[in-house]
Amino acid sequence: MHLYSLALVACTGRLWHWETRAIIAIEHKKPPILWRWLALAGVCAVVSITVAAWISTADKGGLKVLLAVMTAGGGVGIMVLLLLLPAVIPALWEMHPRRSARNAAAIWQWRRTLPGREVYKVSYLAMFPQTREGLAFARAAIDRAVPADTPLYTEARSDSHKTIYTRRGLHPLTTVDGTPTLAMGTR
């Protein structure tokens, strides 16, 4: 689960590592742009129409090849899922849907109050030891990637992490009804 998350962050943000002891990920979150969704929908429509047109005109041999590729791909996919299952079950057990929904609601509400709604998200802050070296590493990565006075947020994993983040200038975000969350933000 962590490898999957890190792969996504590597595609959309920046990763820093401190020897082998720590990883910090920083993503620039921009407000969604309508043309991106329209472009994705257009690509999916073109691919679907192309595949449908090819299937309707393909001969029996071509359809057998397509079926074989789909069957092999499905088998490989099932094998990958079975191999990842021992790692995924504990990660899913650790996730709490109600807590995640509260965090997302608090972050969304907080972002609506920001001018421009552009923020940076910091992940894996708690994966480094809470030592002077670890905190210096995190501070340097944030200073390097995040422009001064730009909103920043993270999601704490526990109340003890919340305490550490509060000492570093982040404040707890609450939902509309005032329910405290593990989401933390600046400003």
Image (tube, helix red, strand yellow):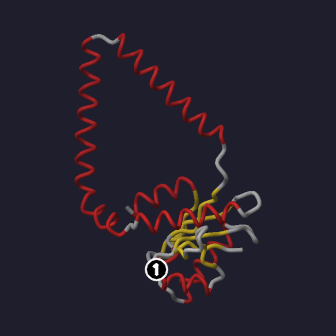
| Residue 134 horizontal/vertical position (percent) | 53, 83
Question: Which corner quadrant of the image does residue 135 belong to?
Answer: bottom right
Q: Secondary structure at mark 1?
A: loop
* Front residue of this view, candidates 155 and 11: 155
Q: Is residue 58 above or below residue 18?
A: above
Please report the residue visible at 51 percent of the width from the left and 66 percent of the height from the top.
Answer: 102
Q: Is residue 57 left or right of residue 170?
A: left
Residue drawn 64% across the image and 59% down it: 28
Relative horizontal placement of residue 5, taking residue 81 as reference (left or right): right
Position above or below: 135 against 56? below
Q: Residue furthest bottom?
A: 132
Report which residue position mark 1 lands on.
158
Question: Which residue is most to the front?
Answer: 177
Q: Is residue 121 above or below residue 68?
A: below
Q: Which image quarter holds the N terminus? A: bottom left
Residue drawn at x 24%, y 45% as measured from the top left: 78
The x, y position of residue 129, in whole percent, is 47, 84
Q: Is residue 123 above or below residue 40?
A: below
Residue 113 picture quarter = bottom right
Asked whether, in this view, residue 22 is left or right of residue 69, the answer is right
Query: Which quadrant, please, contains the C terminus?
Result: bottom right
**Within-10-Å neighbours for mark 1: few <14, some 14–19, many 20+:** few
User: What amino acid type should be assigned to the residue bearing mark 1?
Assistant: Ser
Across and down, in percent, residue 115 comes to 77, 61
Give the tally of numbered discs: 1
Percent across and percent down for residue 13 are 58, 58
- The residue that appears at 55% across and 72% down in the rendered structure is 183
Q: In this view of the protein, which residue sits in the foreground, 162 or 134?
A: 162
